[in-house]
């Protein structure tokens, strides 16, 4: 593996950094934090359209679809910059669904959606989980019945995070009701303002919003079927591989803030940076962040070689999620009681960041598939162990 970036990649990355520095205002960062870093706020939408106009949302896409025809490595470096700087960075359409559309969808869907996606004009919400199907998506029950020129959709989704701000639902539905479960699912792109759709909030432990989405006799035009009917499980799994390649610049930033705190804080006349226990802990975190970076780069390297990482993406996501929990825990130990205060308290250490992330890291460990599920994937597909 050779992680020397090309001159062109270096140039784009420095332009991206400059742009973010110039365009990201405190108001945008506040809105982004409140929306858990997803697209959807007024300022976020304005920002991302300007950002995407440079081809930076999907730089790996062909130029005809608004990309720069550049490497996956560059795409992943940009995503890392986005997470690091606190601007909206989680893009269902551009980063998870887009590649699946490009590979499997009809020309009509490609023409309608790919350019608006890469320009940051529209966003999707992931519509997989249901009350009785999370880890095991083969349990999906939401039904889409073929009625001639449309599908009639009925059922319930749960934990559909962007649904209240997105324009379209990237929906997994059952279209065949007997036979093997994995041969009975299909993917659809559904307008979220279709008659019969109701969206209700669910609030997570980190105060972030996700949603229940109800379908009551919703008519979805046939042309919105992605690829072939009953092949949806394959498409969904591919999109999940992309979701599990986890950028983690926000944790690099959090670590830097902890390091500054450790260097600047004096207790009993001594900087706490001299405390051997604290030095051990931050050195360990720095080592693991470096390892996470290499895992992350190796995924984009694989993509550039034409392979979609599968169990390798699970390894990276699990490693990063475990590391984020360790970082949050260590921060809390070092900051003591001031670390437990929320950002609105004047006594809060590091502006309450650790109080927030201590809760948020749990959320990230669950969505996109829990750590236990990722480890099952590694055991089965990576190590060749039998299915549990
Ligand atoms: C904040 C948040 C946002 C989310 N956003 C979205 C979204 O936008 N779209 C979407 O479709 N979904 C979303 N999800 C859903 C998420 O993908 C599921 O919650 C997750 O996959 C777990 O499914 P579950 O909640 O049904 O738990 P379950 O599947 O019931 O699992 C419960 C526990 O059992 C463990 N477990 C289950 N099966 C096994 C097994 N075979 N081996 C070992 N352990 C196992 C799990 O690891 C977990 O600890 C989100 C979830 C959260 C919390």
Image (cartoon, rainbow, N blue to C red):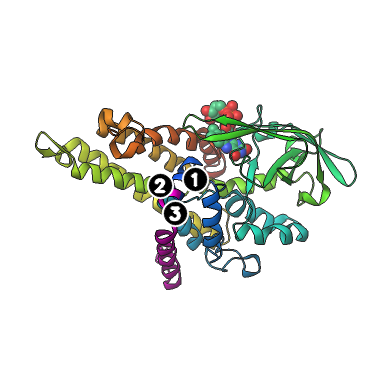
For residue 293, side relative to residue 112 (left or right)? left
Q: Quadrant of ligand 1?
A: top right
Q: Main secondary structure of the magenta part?
A: helix
Q: Secondary structure at mark 2?
A: helix
| Image position of 114 with respect to 162: above or below | below
Instruction: Determine the residue located farthest toward the bottom in the rendered image.
Output: 7
Q: Are marks 1 and 3 in contact (CB under 8 Å)?
A: no
> Could you tell me residue 95's position as x and y percent?
57, 53
Tell me the SS state at disc 1.
loop
Name above or below for residue 247 compared with residue 19.
above
Task: Give the numbered dot on residue 80.
Answer: 3
Q: Contact (CB < 8 A) between labels 2 and 1? A: yes
- Residue at the spot 22% in from the left edge and 42% down from the top edge: 262
The C terminus lies in quadrant:
top right
The quarter of the rendered structure image containing the N terminus is bottom left
Secondary-structure class at tag 3: helix
Q: Residue at x 56, y 59 (%)?
A: 49
Going from N to C along the chain, the mark reached first, 2 or 1, is 1
The magenta region covers 1-27
For the question of whether residue 382 can be seen, the reply is yes
Q: Give residue 33's quadrant in the image.
A: top left
Q: Which residue is mark 1?
A: 37
The residue identified by callout 2 is 250
């Amino acid at each position: 593996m050779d992680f020397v970036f090309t001159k062109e990649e270096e140039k784009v990355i420095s332009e991206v950094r400059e742009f973010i520095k110039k365009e990201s205002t405190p108001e945008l960062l506040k809105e982004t934090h409140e929306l858990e870093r997803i697209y959807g706020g007024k300022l976020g939408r304005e920002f991302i359209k300007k950002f995407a106009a440079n081809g930076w949302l999907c730089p790996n896409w062909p130029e005809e679809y608004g990309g720069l025809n550049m490497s996956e490595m560059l795409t992943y470096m940009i995503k890392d910059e986005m997470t690091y700087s606190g601007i909206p960075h989680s893009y269902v359409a551009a980063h998870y669904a887009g590649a699946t559309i490009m590979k499997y969808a009809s020309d009509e869907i490609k023409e309608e959606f790919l350019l608006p996606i890469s320009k940051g004009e529209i966003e999707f919400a992931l519509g997989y989980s249901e009350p009785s199907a999370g880890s095991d998506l083969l349990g999906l029950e939401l039904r889409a019945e073929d009625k001639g020129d449309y599908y009639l959709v009925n059922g319930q989704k749960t934990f559909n995070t962007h649904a209240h701000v997105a324009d379209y639902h990237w929906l997994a539905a059952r279209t065949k009701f007997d036979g093997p479960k994995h041969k009975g699912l299909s993917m659809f792109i559904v307008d979220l303002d279709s008659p019969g759709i109701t969206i209700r909030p669910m609030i997570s432990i980190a105060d972030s919003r996700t949603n229940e989405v109800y379908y009551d006799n919703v008519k979805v035009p046939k042309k919105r079927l992605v690829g072939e009917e009953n092949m949806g499980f394959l498409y969904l799994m591919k999109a999940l591989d992309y979701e599990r390649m986890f950028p983690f610049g926000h944790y690099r930033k959090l670590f830097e803030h902890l390091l500054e705190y450790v260097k600047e804080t004096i207790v009993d006349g001594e900087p706490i940076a001299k405390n051997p226990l604290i030095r051990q802990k931050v050195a360990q975190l720095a080592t693991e962040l470096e390892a996470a970076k290499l895992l992350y780069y190796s995924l984009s390297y694989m993509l550039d070689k034409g392979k979609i990482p599968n169990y390798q993406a699970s390894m990276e996501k699990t490693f990063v999620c475990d590391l984020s929990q360790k970082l949050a825990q260590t921060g809390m130990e070092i900051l003591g009681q001031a670390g437990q205060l929320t950002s609105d308290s004047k006594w809060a250490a590091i502006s309450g960041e650790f109080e927030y992330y201590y809760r948020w890291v749990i959320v990230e460990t669950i969505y996109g598939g829990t750590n236990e599920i990722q480890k099952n994937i590694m055991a089965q597909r990576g190590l060749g162990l039998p299915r549990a």
